Image (cartoon, rainbow, N blue to C red):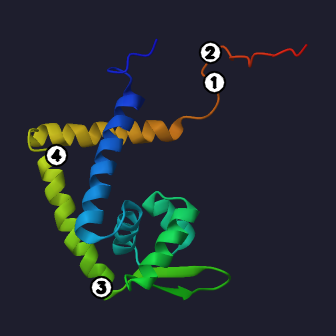
Amino acid sequence: MVAADRYVPGLVRAVANKLEGGASRFYRKHFTIGLSEWHILVALAADPWITSPVLCKNAGLDKAAVSRSLARMEEQGLVLSRDTSGRSRATALTAKGRRLHDRIAQAALTREEQLLADFSPKQVDQLIGLLTALSKAAATLTDTAPKGTRKTRTPVIESE
């Protein structure tokens, strides 16, 4: 049996869900953008004039989410896209998009301070180190069953 209070993937997912849900509501209420748009603002602030595949990777979003979000953001005047060689388009923040990024970044850092208020600086450093190591370990996992794991067979339902 999996102990929910000791199962690391479940605990990480639960924390991520709480953080993302709260952030999504906060960004929509105060800045009228969603979490996908915020991830795109962050990625483009760090690396302007990138193509959609790079943006997907950097923002941690799938192609469809990036496409929908960029269309909305372009209508709002937050991003500008231009054709590059081939079929690609590169995107960057407009001045309006940069200003919005900067305003939200301040709020995001304040929320992070609130989240970590009960941790010492040493504990924060340890947490960052552990999360970084966990992320690297997660990237090495495959869909291959670990040794000693029995495959679960799909039950055969016989019809009469």
In percent of the image, x 26 and y 77: which residue is there? 100
Q: Earlier in the sequence, mark 4 or mark 1?
A: 4
Q: Are marks 3 and 2 in contact (CB under 8 Å)?
A: no
Residue 32 vertical position relative to residue 77 in the rendered view, above or below: above
x then y, percent, for residue 96: 30, 85
Q: Which residue is mark 2?
A: 149
Q: Give the CA separation, mark 2 to mark 1.
A: 6 Å
Q: Are marks 3 and 4 in contact (CB under 8 Å)?
A: no
Q: Give the CA separation, mark 3 to mark 2.
A: 53 Å
- Which of discs 3 and 2 lies nearer the camera? The answer is 3
x then y, percent, for residue 152: 68, 17
Mark 3: give few (<14), some (14-19) or many (20+) Cα within 10 Å. Answer: few
Q: Amino acid at mark 1?
A: Ala
Residue 40 vertical position relative to residue 18 in the rendered view, above or below: below
Q: Nearer the viewer, residue 7 or 23?
A: 23
x then y, percent, for residue 113: 13, 51
Q: Amino acid at mark 3?
A: Lys
Q: Earlier in the sequence, mark 3 or mark 2?
A: 3
Q: Amino acid at mark 4?
A: Leu
Q: Earlier in the sequence, mark 3 or mark 1?
A: 3
Residue 70 vertical position relative to residue 24 in the rendered view, above or below: below
Q: Which residue is mark 3?
A: 96
Q: Which residue is mark 4?
A: 115
Q: Earlier in the sequence, mark 3 or mark 4?
A: 3
Q: Give the CA separation, mark 2 to mark 4.
A: 38 Å
Q: Amino acid at mark 2?
A: Thr
| Dot 2: element | loop
| Dot 1: element | loop
Q: Which residue is mark 1?
A: 145
Q: Is residue 157 left or right of residue 35?
A: right
